[in-house]
Image: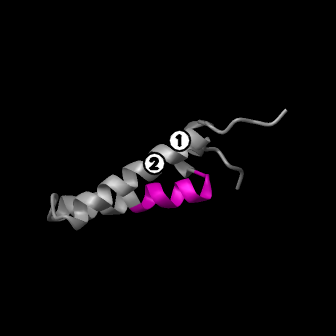
């Protein structure tokens, strides 16, 4: 797998994942929506740690800067 996510994209995803987990654990969101958001946050965290987003590959996006 080649990295297709830039640093800014990765940081934004981590911040969103942290915000979702805070909302979940403080019980600001509840029910089915809470679990859906938690799953999305987990996916954001995983893809940002790996540096690869399968959805980006499907649509042909690449935010990672290439080395010359």
Q: Are marks 1 and 2 in contact (CB under 8 Å)?
A: yes
Q: Is residue 15 above or below residue 9?
A: below
* Between 2 and 25, the one nearer to me in the picture: 25
Residue 45 badge? none
* Picture coordinates of residue 20, whole percent (x, y): 30, 56
Q: Quadrant of the C terminus?
A: top right
Q: Is residue 45 above or below residue 5?
A: below
Residue identifier under label 1: 9
Q: Which mark is residue 13?
A: 2
Q: Main secondary structure of the magenta part?
A: helix
Identify the element where label 1 is drawn: helix
C-alpha distance separating marks 1 and 2: 6 Å
Residue 38 lies, in percent from the top left, at 31, 62
Q: Nearest the camera: 21 or 32?
A: 21
Determine whether, in the image, residue 31 is placed left or right of residue 36: left
User: In the figure, is residue 26 to the left or right of 18?
Assistant: left
At a point 68% along the width and 49% down the height, the residue shown is: 3
Indicate the quadrant containing the N terminus: top left, top right, bottom left or bottom right. Answer: bottom right
Between residues 67 and 26, which one lies in front from this camera angle? 26
Residue range in magenta is: 42-52
Query: Which residue is found at the position 56% from the left and 51% from the top?
Result: 54
């Amino acid at each position: 797998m080649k990295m297709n996510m830039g640093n800014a994209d990765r940081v934004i995803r981590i911040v969103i994942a942290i915000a979702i987990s805070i909302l979940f654990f403080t019980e600001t969101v509840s029910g089915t929506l809470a679990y859906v958001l938690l799953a999305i946050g987990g996916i954001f965290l995983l893809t940002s740690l790996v540096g690869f987003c399968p959805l980006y590959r499907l649509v042909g996006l690449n935010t990672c800067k290439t080395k010359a």
